[in-house]
Amino acid sequence: MAETKTAVANKPAWVDLATTDAAASRDFYSKVFGWNIKVEPDPQYGGYGMAEVGGKRAAESVPKMSPEQPTAWTL
């Protein structure tokens, strides 16, 4: 996330992407936003990826947890 010198009301604090193709999404968004995305290797986390930019956490991406869940960004 961008840093500001002054307080901004109602700014996003966190973004999360649940998708059917987490690997393709990570590849796409890392190119668009310049994110470095590290995927948790432990299988119990199901492919959870943490995106960082400038050494600061920016977002996360995960595979959808159920087929009924829509592909979506959440704030």
Image (cartoon, rainbow, N blue to C red):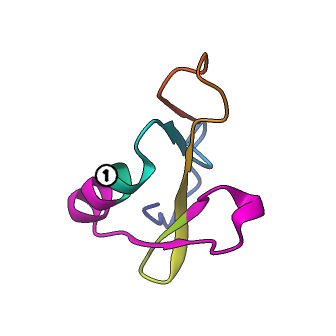
Residue 24 part of the magenta segment: no
Query: In this orientation, which residue lies closer to the viewer: 15 or 70?
Result: 70
> Which kind of residue does numbered mark 1 sit on?
Ala
At a point 42% along the width and 62% down the height, the residue shown is 2
18 in relation to 23, above or below: above
33 in relation to 73, above or below: below
Query: In this orientation, which residue lies closer to the viewer: 14 or 70?
Result: 70
The part of the chain drawn in magenta is 27-49
Residue 3 percent location from the top left of the image: 47, 66
At a point 47% along the width and 60% down the height, the residue shown is 1
At a point 55% along the width and 63% down the height, the residue shown is 49
The answer to whether residue 26 is left or right of residue 5 is left
**Helix, strand or loop for disc 1:** helix
Residue 50 percent location from the top left of the image: 56, 66
The quadrant of the image that shows the C terminus is top right
Residue sitting at the far left: 31
Residue sitting at the far right: 44
Residue 74 percent location from the top left of the image: 57, 33
Q: Which residue is mark 1?
A: 24
Number of numbered discs overlaid on the protein picture: 1
Residue sitting at the far top: 68
At a point 61% along the width and 59% down the height, the residue shown is 48
21 in relation to 23, above or below: above
Residue 42 percent location from the top left of the image: 71, 72
The crowd level at tag 1 (other Cα within 10 Å; few <14, some 14-19, many 20+) is few
Residue 35 part of the magenta segment: yes
The answer to whether residue 34 is left or right of residue 44 is left
Query: In this orientation, which residue lies closer to the viewer: 23 or 7?
Result: 23
Locate residue 34: give its quadrant: bottom left
Query: In this orientation, which residue lies closer to the viewer: 68 or 58?
Result: 68
